[in-house]
Image (cartoon, helix red, strand yellow):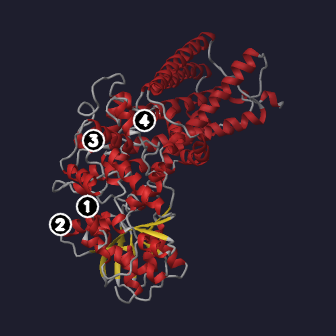
Amino acid sequence: MRPELVTREVFWNIAPAGRVMFYLMAIAAVAVFGYGVWRQIARVMRAKPVDLSWAEIRAGAWRNLVSLLLNRTIARRNPLTGWMHRLIMWGFLTLFIGTLIVALEYDVFQVLLGRRPGFWFGNFFLVFELVLDSMGALFLGGLTIALWRWTGMRHMTLWLLAIGITGFAAEGMRLAAMGTDLAYSPYWSPIGHIFAAPWRGAGVETIRWCHATLWMLHAAASLGWVAALPYSPRVIHVLTAGVNVLLGDLRPKGRLKTVDVEAAFENDQPLGLGHATDLTRKDVLDLISCTECGRCEANCPAHGSGKLLSPRAIITKLRDFPAGETRPIMGNAISAEEIWACTTCMACVEVCPVSIDPLSKILEARRNEVMVQDRYPETFGDVFNGFTRRGNPWNQHSSARLEWARGLEVKTMAEAAAAGEPVEYLFWVGCSAAFDPRNQKIARSMVKILHGAGVSFAVLGEEESCTGDPARRIGHEYLFQTQARQNVETLQGYGVRKILTLCPHCFNCIGKEYPDFGGHYTVVHHTQFIHELLDAGRVRLPQGIDAVAAYHDSCYLGRHNGIYDSPREILRKIPGLRLVEMKRSRETGMCCGSGGGLMWVEEEPGKRVNEKRVQQVQEALANDSGESGKRLVASGCPFCMTMLEDGLAAGKADIQDRDIAELVAEAMGGAP
């Protein structure tokens, strides 16, 4: 048989009147679709412009595209749900491309160019039929799983399922009616062949009538779905998700945008998120892309502990707030209780499959509340006063900065400079380890490790001041910038290039946010550094520790900076220590509850995040099969240490909280 005969008629069994009706429906659907898309684009473009870093976009384009196509964000947490999304997405894309190919064949090659057939015949046609049938079957499979698993979006899922089934049913009727007149084996359309089985033996005219009726219903359902797409808040992500994921790198994890506070006040410019007009184009794209799946809400520690905050509600309420509304957002769309419950742990950002960032909206709302409206929880007034008077949120005098080092050989940068001694690392102790008696033990343990490894280091001592991270996360950008500029000036005065930190908040702030103020340093967290020292053989661990430890991932070390392996590798190298994982660990780890300034807020009983986390620690340690040894929760953050200790005390748990530096120092043996 000649290859050009191996094809099929595009509008088989559809009368001229039916074809006219189809094109009228298609024109109407495309017009409605186009208007809906234009409305959404116009809404985005009316928002505040953002600076596009095309270099960053290009650098992350391939990674983001692969992540989107493989649905990695969902699949790594729930393989079945991941495959469900993959099947629906891959099937949808394949069927959409197939529809475009058919339109090109008929409308361009056959109608405009007069070539019958154009290119849609022979082996190309056969492969086309096989691929579309196969991918259509996967599409139906994904939709069936979705129908079984989802309580939301059920009507849209049923709509798509009806489109897929009617399409295959119409194909089966065509195959059955043509019978031996078919120019190719029906097995090239395996699913259509299955759907043809019930029609075998039926009269051809009956099949034709049923086919024509069902074909028009299928066409109407398909075109209706296309028309409705840009108007359905939970389905429009089909159009916007790819763009939002591609632009995800515009907001690097752990770094906030620096704003010119003084210029804003002088020129009466908006600060933070106070009105709908303060949203940026990326913000609006986030709002449009939300599917309301609830993953952010399910992973939010504040919501999980019974607080009002829901990242999903933040996004949907901002989305539904009229773009031209002159009323302020706070009190009309979002409540103060919601934004002040956020721990800035970034769990909502990490878990979102379409790269929506609820956290940035919360932090911008805080900026407006603090700097413009002068409204914030009462205890934050003491924090701000501490920064203003003494450069730290604890309001401690700088003379107490070296209390932790009593009896240790620790030089200050000033002493090293006066003696002409070079220093490789500045040991940034941080406020918590300097002032809190419990956390001072972490700093002392780190000094023992540094001395044991022969590391050249010094501290700033009384010259050290808070990085300003708590002020920035609370919303007081001006105080943060004051702290940052002062610290950068101090560091530049000593020519500092390498900084070792104990606190992940300091690590993140100095490494990612100080460059905006001229501070460019190589910053390393103490768990990273200890891991490097162990691998290089500069630190040895001869003394075993008979214990089982659950490791708690600090949010600012983990989700904000992607450091998950170094702490675990250290624990595995300690003789006698058994490491167990909590159900919520690594990317899904639960916050201790101290971030975003909540270290200085007293939570309501029964709604404390740290107590919820301690319960998870207890569950993990209870599942350990070991017969002896202490039970520990290991951490790498002084803030986490404080919160976990409080949670353990509240729960009267027989569990010790130890920093990784403390465990390593103990395993080194010798004097503490």
Quickly name the residue at label 3: 370
Provide residue 340's location: percent of width, then percent of height.
Answer: 25, 46
Q: CA distance from mark 3 to mark 4?
A: 21 Å
What's the residue type where badge 1 is placed? Asn
What's the residue type where badge 2 is placed? Ala
Q: CA distance from mark 4 to mark 1?
A: 31 Å
Q: Earlier in the sequence, mark 4 or mark 1?
A: 4
- Tell me what residue is drawn at x 33 percent, y 42 percent: 362
Disc nearest the viewer among 4 and 2: 4
- Tell me what residue is drawn at x 69 percent, y 18 percent: 107
Provide residue 187's location: percent of width, then percent of height.
Answer: 68, 39
Q: On residue 283, which mark appears?
A: 4
298 relative to 182 in the view: left or right = left
Name the element at disc 2.
helix
Is the Cβ of the residue at disc 3 closer than 8 Å to that at disc 1?
no
Q: CA distance from mark 2 to mark 3?
A: 32 Å
